[in-house]
Image: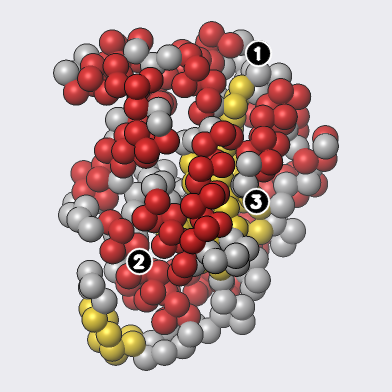
Amino acid sequence: MTVPLPGHLHTHRDGLAKLADLGYSDIWSAESDGADGFTPLAMAAAWEPRLRLGTAIIPAFTRSPAAFAQCVASLADLAPGRFAIGIGSSSNVIVEKWNGVPFVEPYRKVRDMVRFLHDALAGEKIAKKYDTFEVNGFRLGVRPEVKPQILIAALREGMLRLAAREADGTIINWLSPQDTKKVAAVVNEASGGQPKEIVCRIFCCPSENTEVVRQAAKFAIAAYLNVPVYAAFHEWLGRGPQLQGMWDAWKAGDRKAALTAIPDEVVDDLIVHGSPAECRKRIDAYFANGVTTSSIAIMALDPELNYWQAVDELSPARG
């Protein structure tokens, strides 16, 4: 399940216990404009030891190398053996527009941060020039008992291959069950037969109010898929012809026309919706096509949706 849960952070203890009671195994945090990616997991580490903890994702750009390593080591020390750090490039919007950090050479930045974390978590005193930054004399003062798994958020082939070669797996999102076949094939080929975790953030709204869900979902799709990295991703997936109308209208400044241009079949590809049984079946299709771990993100696209009822209806306990 994706966290934070609804409501103020200090109120989440019972909700985290409920997730574990319902059979959810993992929680995955994100970092954009809400809570930071580490604090909700630190609270969960103390409150609910049954849950595995992961970030999906922390941007490689928005923390200095030493600060990044300290955050990772601290949470790994707090939750030995049940924390995975997911790192990604994020986007020009979050990195450059919101944080004032130039969004340049994202592939190399992510690669260098992953390599630095491997070095730092090994306990080395680091005096090394990476391609995108240099570290002179840093050594982690926190030594976790268990090194956390390192996962790389990836969209297209370059980052997927990097995740397979230099990390424990990858994190993917904004794609259909069918799309995961293409992604998993790249990861599995690049890993040389070594098993890799493929974590997929799956957007879900268990509601049969189809037209309401579709119309609301188009706002989310437009917000994401007009970001250059996601536009390029969907061109690579072969969805360019379906999305060209939206991209053209968006570039022309006509937001209403951009929303209208999004085909319903794109919504149905990218957002899991329908009855709870239909949603569970579609979630299962992601696993059948190569996903090994899911992070369900429940979207309140239907105003009538009850969040905790949705959590219950989608739970692993229901089979």
Say which residue appears at 64% left-offset and 73% top-offset: 80
Q: CA distance from mark 2 to mark 1?
A: 42 Å
Q: Nearer the viewer, residue 249 or 64?
A: 249
Residue that carries the numbered disc 1 in the rendered image: 208
Left or right: 217 as drawn, with respect to 228: right
Classify 10 Å Cα crowding around label 3: few (below 14), some (14-19), many (20 and above): some
Residue that carries the numbered disc 2 in the rendered image: 111
**SS for dot 3:** loop
Left or right: 109 as drawn, with respect to 291: left
Up-down relation of residue 204 to residue 250 (above or below): below
- The spot of residue 136 in percent (x, y) is 25, 86
Residue that carries the numbered disc 3 in the rendered image: 292
Nearest to N terminus: mark 2 or mark 1: 2
Quadrant where the N terminus is found in the figure: top right
Up-down relation of residue 229 to residue 304 (above or below): below
Quadrant where the C terminus is found in the figure: top right
Looking at the picture, which amino acid does disc 1 mark? Glu
- The spot of residue 181 in percent (x, y) is 56, 42
Q: Nearer the viewer, residue 158 or 40?
A: 158
**SS for dot 2:** helix
- The spot of residue 54 in percent (x, y) is 56, 57
- The spot of residue 109 in percent (x, y) is 29, 63
